[in-house]
Amino acid sequence: MTTLLIATSNPGKVAEIASLLEGLNCRLIGLGDLPEAPPIVEETGATFAENALLKAEYYHRLTGLPTLADDSGLEVDALDGRPGVYSARYGSEGMTSAEQIELLLDEMKDAPDTRRKARFVCCVAVFGMVAGKEIEQIFEDRCEGRIARRPRGSGGFGYDPIFIDEETGHTFAELTPEEKALRSHRGKALQHTREFLVECLQKEN
């Protein structure tokens, strides 16, 4: 059975991605499941797609395993698209997600409702040998919403408590994991990824 490496050490993200890929005829592991934690790659790409592919290729080269990596982030109109590709590194080094949220809300404290439009963007890259074929594939999707004036909800991770989904009116942190999977940028991009991998793995059998 093929082992697919999910290139993240964030247990919340590993669990979310694994649930979205449920039913694939392969074993899914995260970086934390490796015998030794590999060095973290520097994300030097200018776009989400470049960073996702950079990570997937890097961890594949280190481990020999086909690797799935994603790069995602929040683009806020009032902040001219920031934090964008720097979403995970927003603010000073070592800041927690709660501190990053506080910083972003502080920067937007004077922004009226009409200027609080934002979107989550996700790119997923798959790199390595799957079913005897070398794969280099990227899938991208997004979801539109707006930035809340205060955090709401206890689910999810990252910026979920302040991202209000356009259609439901709830923050991602207020949605169940199943609801979020249907709505989120990562859920949509991984659905495309899953369809692609199902087809590849069927050829293996």
Image (cartoon, grey):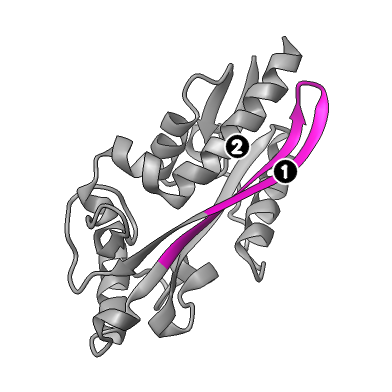
The residue that disc 2 covers is: 193
Q: Residue at x 25, y 85 (%)?
A: 112
Q: In the figure, 47 relative to 137: above or below?
A: below
The residue at 76%/21% (across/down) is 131
Instruction: Tell me the CA gap for discs 1 and 2.
Output: 9 Å
The residue shown at (19%, 65%) is 151
Q: Main secondary structure of the magenta part?
A: strand
Magenta stretch in the rendered image:
119-141
Residue that label 1 marks: 137
Q: Nearer the viewer, residue 30 or 26?
A: 26
- Side (left or right) of 119 relative to 29: left
Left or right: residue 25 versus residue 117 is right
Q: Nearer the viewer, residue 86 or 203?
A: 203
Task: Choose between 87 and 188: the one closer to the eye.
Answer: 188
In the figure, 21 relative to 25: above or below? below
Mark 2 surroundings: few (<14), some (14-19) or many (≥20) residues within 10 A:
many
Can residue 176 be seen here? The reply is yes
Instruction: Kindly give the residue lying farthest to the bottom in the view shown.
Output: 110
Quadrant where the image shows the C terminus? top right
The kind of residue tagged 2 is Thr
Residue 159 found in image quarter: bottom left
Mark 1 in CB contact with mark 2 (< 8 angstroms): yes
N-terminal-most mark, 1 or 2? 1
Residue 136 on the magenta segment: yes
- Residue 156 in percent (x, y) is at 29, 48
Circle 1 packing at 10 Å, graded few (<14), some (14-19), many (20+), is some
Element on which disc 2 rests: helix
Q: Nearer the viewer, residue 136 or 96?
A: 136
Q: Residue at x 47, y 63 (%)?
A: 73
Quadrant holding the N terminus: top right
